[in-house]
Amino acid sequence: MQGDNDGLASFWMPFTANRAYKAHPRQIVSASGMHYQSGDGRTILDGTAGLWCSNAGHCRTEIAAAMARAAATLDFAPTFQLGHPAAFELAQRLAALMPPGLDRIFFTNSGSESVDTALKIALAVQRARGQGTRTRLIGRERGYHGVGFGGISVGGIVGNRRAFALLPGADHLRHTHDPARNAFSRGFPPHGAELADDLQRLVDLHGAETIAAVIVEPMAGSTGVLLPPVGYLERLRAICDRNGILLIFDEVITAFGRVGAATAAQAWGVTPDILTMAKGLTNAAVPMGAVAVKRELHDAVIESAPGGIELAHGYTYSGHPLACAAGLAALDLYAREGLFERAAELAPYWEAAAHGLRGRRHIVDIRTIGLVAGMELEPRPDAPTARAMELFHRAFDAGLLVRATGDIIALSPPLIVEKAQIDQMFGMLGELLDTIA
Ligand SMILES: Cc1ncc(COP(=O)(O)O)c(C=O)c1O
C-alpha cells in the first residue's frame, strides 16, 4: 500500500478497488463533447456518458456559462423558509417535463438522496392518509438505489448490503433477469410479466396494510441492464393500485432521454406515484437530484399537517443556485437539440450495432433499449467478473470508456453520439473480445 507521501494515497476512492487502482492509476484530465482526455494524453471515446449522466456530452459551454453567471450572482441562498427564483423556475420546468400529474418537485443533491427522499415521502403520504401502519418498503433483487441506508435496504445487490445494518421490514421482489428464456432480446424481453405477481405474494405474506411503497428501476442499469419483461410494469402498477401501495420509479439513470423520452414512465406508458431523478438533470455538470410527486400525494401531506413545517426533511443544498442554473441550461439544451427524440431515432441503429456482436467470443447475452446496451460475458470459472474488468481496462487503454458491472459490459453514450462513433464503439469491443482470455 502507498505511504503517506504518495500523491494518490489520501483519496479513499468510492466503489473502487483502491489498491489495484493506485498500483495502475488511469486518470481523466479534461472532456469535450463525446470525448475524455486521459492523463497520459490520449483521447477516450465516452461510451458511458460518464456514469450514465452527461447526456448532452461534456463541457457544454451553455451550461458552464450559466453556472458561472449564477456563481457570480448568488452563490448560495437557503431554501429553508426562504427561496430564490431559479429553484422555483426549475421546479416548474421539471413539473412540465414529468409524466402527467407528477408536478410537485423536491430537490436533492444525488440519486441516493432522491431515493431516500422518495421513501420518506411515501411513508409521510401513508401517514397523512391515515395509513400509518404502512411502514414496509419493498425493493427488488438486483436493484440499485444508491447507498443511503434506505437505498441499500430496498436495493438488491448483496455486496452493497452485507456489511451494513439495514432498515427493518424491507423486502424484495424477485429480479426479472431470465437469460434462459430471454437471451438476445431486443427491447423488452418477451417472458416474465408474471414475476410482477411477486408483489401479490408479499402482500399475502405481510398484509397490504403494512406496505407503504414498492420501488423499482423501470430498467435496472447499474446491475447490468435488466429490462422489464413485456407487461411487467403494467402488472406491478395494477397490484399497487389494488392494494393501496405507492409505486416509485427510480429514474436516476433513465430520466432525461436515455430511453428516448423525458422519462421511462412516459416512454413505456406506466405512471408511477413518485419518480426519482439525478444525473442528467444538470448534465452532471454539478450534483443535483430531484423527486417528482403526484400532486394529490403532496397535497395530502401538506394539508394533513397541523401547521408549520409539513415534511421534516431537506438538505442545505436542496435547490442550490448553481445547480438550478445548470439544470435550467441543461433542460434548454435537451429541448433545443431535441436530444430525447434523437435518442429514440438512433435506437434502432444502436440496437443493430450492439446485436452485431452476437456470436463473438465470450458473449452470452446482449440486451438493448434506447441508447443502452448490456453485453453479458461468460464468467471465468475460477474468477467471476474478472473478464469484464479486464475488458474495461483494455478498452480504456485502447481509447474507449465502457462500464463493467459483474460480468456485464454496459454502454450508455451521450445522446449526441454519431452513427460513426456507434460503429467505432462496437467495432473496438468486437476486436477487444478476441484479445482477452
Ligand atoms: C437507479 C439508481 N438510483 C440511485 C443511484 C444513486 O445515485 P448517486 O450515485 O447519485 O447517489 C443510481 C446511481 O447510479 C442509480 O442508477
Image (cartoon, rainbow, N blue to C red):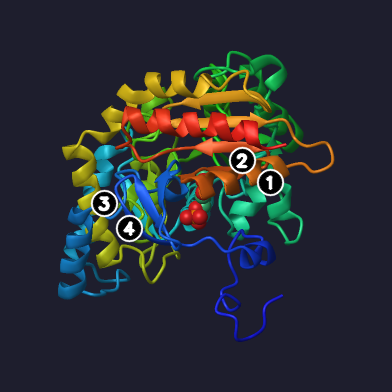
Residue 172 screen position, x and y as percent: 69, 39
CA separation, marks 2 and 4? Answer: 24 Å
How packed is label 3: few (under 14 Cα within 10 Å), some, or many (20 or more)? many
Q: Are marks 1 and 3 in contact (CB under 8 Å)?
A: no
Name the amino acid, label 4: Ala
Q: Are marks 4 and 1 in contact (CB under 8 Å)?
A: no
Residue 426 screen position, x and y as percent: 48, 29
Quadrant of the rendered structure where residue 286 is? bottom left
Q: Which residue is mark 4?
A: 285
Could you tell me which quadrant the N terminus lies in?
Answer: bottom right
Q: Secondary structure at mark 2?
A: loop
Q: Which residue is mark 1?
A: 157
Q: Does label 2 or label 3 sit earlier along the sequence?
A: 3
> Disc 1 or disc 3, which is closer to the eye?
1
Name the amino acid, label 2: Thr
Q: Within 8 Å of ligand 1, the CB of disc 4?
A: no
Nearer the observer, 153 or 18:
18
Q: Is residue 379 visible?
A: yes
How packed is label 1: few (under 14 Cα within 10 Å), some, or many (20 or more)? some
> Disc 2 or disc 1, which is closer to the eye?
2
Name the amino acid, label 3: Ala
Q: Which residue is mark 3?
A: 91
> Disc 2 or disc 3, which is closer to the eye?
2
Q: Are marks 2 and 1 in contact (CB under 8 Å)?
A: yes
Q: Does label 4 or label 1 sit earlier along the sequence?
A: 1
Q: Does label 2 or label 4 sit earlier along the sequence?
A: 2
Residue 103 screen position, x and y as percent: 30, 43
